[in-house]
Image: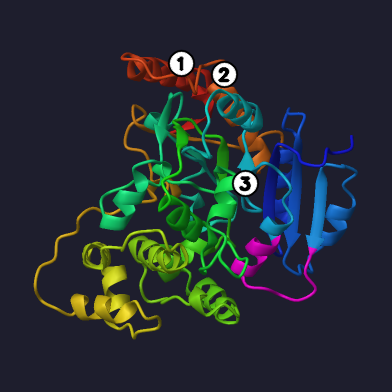
């Protein structure tokens, strides 16, 4: 089937040396039952058979591009986005996947509301071979993040980000494991034509787009599956994962240092999501001239509180030297003995599955099926877990009770796959 000039959706997958997981990721995209979408694969000079696999796909919806030389992750994301033709863009990693009805659900939401982005919580899948596999086998789900309604978000995010108030990632426009409009993408495009202006493209997009306060919708139900594999990077390089996997952290840092964009510099000794957000906000503020000033003092308090929250963060940060122009005030504050209290730290807890304490709050599901254990088997088992339960409905006073009953029914359907 030939694509129209502009499909409704572009599913964009940057990849590098992960054909083993990529083939399952792409298949989860190809199985979407929607008439208007394309799949863009941007290959970062892989030599593991990725090109051969992509060339073998007899599917007009799939468009494959490859660089001849290795690029930084930011540059590869930028190239990937530049190839997208859709009115709306969804980016996922090459070890991630979509759910059975991702595009159908998004199409329904976007046709009934004039919004520029849709966000959602993630189902978490741990690939075999990952360090977390023993603690978190298969797939992890939270009770309060499935079978939920939709809510309007976005318009208040600019003030929250500017002043350092607490904000959840689901309130912000996410291009990575989210859906954003072409208008929103163009609104943060810089004067030199780039969209992603920091080492972590997903964090930068959330910060820059969030400052503009565009209207959006969040649905309390997963529309994609976040896959954790032995080679996952990006945000992991800025959290405790960096401390537990120093080799991957060094590789990510070295490749990022070769990026020609100087603003893409980062400090590998600050293992802090708040630090990443603060740097991105400051970079975006300089580029989006209509945005009011960022409250640096409030953000530094948040960063210091986060770095002091765990020994693995603090020990690295206390030895840090300034790498970017944003670093010295943070270093000075860390070494100050005065107590500092954070205004409120935005978290990405959805990206760090923990062993559930009670099936009333969360569950782990085994994802082995017919001899396989991949993002595709996770997709199928998630589909069975969801059943015919409602999700994405308009909130009403009793929606939380419905969510609870739907959760119990789902546990009953999948009881043989539960691991407590």
Picture residue at 54% right of the left edge, 61% below the top: 201
Query: What separation in Å lies between label 2 and label 1 (alpha carbons)?
Result: 9 Å
Query: What separation in Å lies between label 1 and label 3 (alpha carbons)?
Result: 39 Å
The x, y position of residue 20, in whole percent, is: 73, 55
Q: Are marks 2 and 1 in contact (CB under 8 Å)?
A: yes
Q: Magenta span covers which residues?
A: 66-79
Picture residue at 73% right of the left edge, 27% below the top: 33
Query: What separation in Å lies between label 3 and label 2 (alpha carbons)?
Result: 33 Å
The kind of secondary structure element at disc 3 is helix
Q: Quadrant of the C terminus?
A: top left
136 versus 292 height, above or below: above
Does residue 343 show up magenta in the picture? no
Q: Nearer the viewer, residue 183 or 102?
A: 183
The x, y position of residue 360, in whole percent, is: 34, 27
**For the residue carrying disc 2, how many other residues have a C-alpha within 10 Å: few (<14), some (14-19), or many (20+)?**
some
Q: Nearer the viewer, residue 84 or 336?
A: 84
* Residue receiving disc 1: 409
- Mark 1 or 3: in front is 3
* Residue receiving disc 3: 182
Q: Which of the two discs, 1 and 3, labels the residue nearer the N terminus?
A: 3
Q: How many marks?
A: 3
Residue 408 relative to residue 131: left or right: left
The kind of secondary structure element at disc 2 is loop
Q: Which of the two discs, 2 and 1, labels the residue nearer the N terminus?
A: 2
The disc placed on residue 15 is: none
Q: Nearer the viewer, residue 335 or 112?
A: 112
Q: Which of the two discs, 3 and 2, labels the residue nearer the N terminus?
A: 3
* Residue receiving disc 2: 387
Picture residue at 22% right of the left edge, 62% below the top: 298
Q: Quadrant of the N terminus?
A: top right
Picture residue at 60% right of the left edge, 65% below the top: 194
């Amino acid at each position: 089937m030939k694509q129209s000039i502009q499909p409704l959706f572009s599913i964009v997958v940057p990849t590098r040396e992960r054909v083993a997981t990529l083939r399952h990721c792409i298949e989860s995209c190809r199985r979407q039952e929607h008439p208007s979408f394309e799949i863009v694969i941007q290959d970062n000079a892989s030599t593991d058979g990725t090109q051969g696999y992509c060339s073998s796909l007899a599917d007009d919806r799939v468009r494959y591009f490859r660089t001849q030389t290795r690029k930084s992750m930011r540059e590869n994301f930028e190239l990937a986005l530049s190839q997208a033709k859709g009115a709306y863009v969804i980016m996922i990693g090459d070890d991630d996947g979509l759910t059975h009805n991702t595009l159908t659900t998004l199409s329904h939401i976007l046709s009934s509301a004039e919004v520029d982005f849709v966000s959602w919580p993630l189902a978490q899948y741990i690939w075999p071979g990952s360090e977390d596999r023993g603690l978190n086998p298969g797939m992890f789900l939270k009770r309060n993040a499935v079978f939920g309604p939709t809510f309007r978000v976005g318009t208040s995010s600019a003030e929250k980000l500017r002043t350092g108030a607490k904000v959840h990632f689901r309130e912000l426009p996410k291009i990575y494991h989210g859906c954003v409009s072409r208008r929103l993408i163009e609104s943060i495009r810089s004067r030199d034509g780039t969209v992603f202006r920091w080492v972590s493209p997903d964090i930068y997009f959330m910060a820059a787009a969030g400052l503009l306060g565009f209207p959006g919708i969040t649905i309390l139900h997963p529309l994609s599956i976040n896959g954790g594999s032995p080679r996952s990077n990006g945000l992991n390089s800025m959290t405790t994962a960096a401390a537990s996997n120093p080799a991957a952290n060094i590789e990510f840092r070295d490749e990022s240092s070769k990026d020609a964009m100087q603003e893409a510099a980062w400090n590998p000794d600050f293992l802090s999501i708040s630090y990443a957000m603060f740097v991105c906000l400051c970079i975006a503020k300089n580029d989006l001239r209509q945005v009011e000033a960022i409250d640096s003092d409030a953000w530094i308090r948040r960063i210091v509180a986060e770095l002091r929250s765990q020994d693995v963060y603090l020990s690295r940060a206390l030895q840090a030297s300034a790498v970017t122009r944003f670093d010295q005030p943070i270093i000075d504050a860390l070494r100050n003995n005065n107590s500092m209290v954070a205004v409120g730290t935005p978290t990405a807890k959805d990206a760090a599955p923990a062993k559930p304490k009670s099936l009333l709050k969360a569950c782990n599901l085994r994802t082995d099926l017919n001899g396989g254990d991949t993002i595709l088997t996770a997709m199928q088992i998630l589909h069975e877990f969801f059943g015919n339960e409602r999700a994405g409905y308009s909130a009403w006073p009793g929606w939380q009770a419905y969510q609870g009953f739907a959760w119990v029914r789902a546990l009953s359907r999948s009881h043989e796959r539960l691991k407590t």
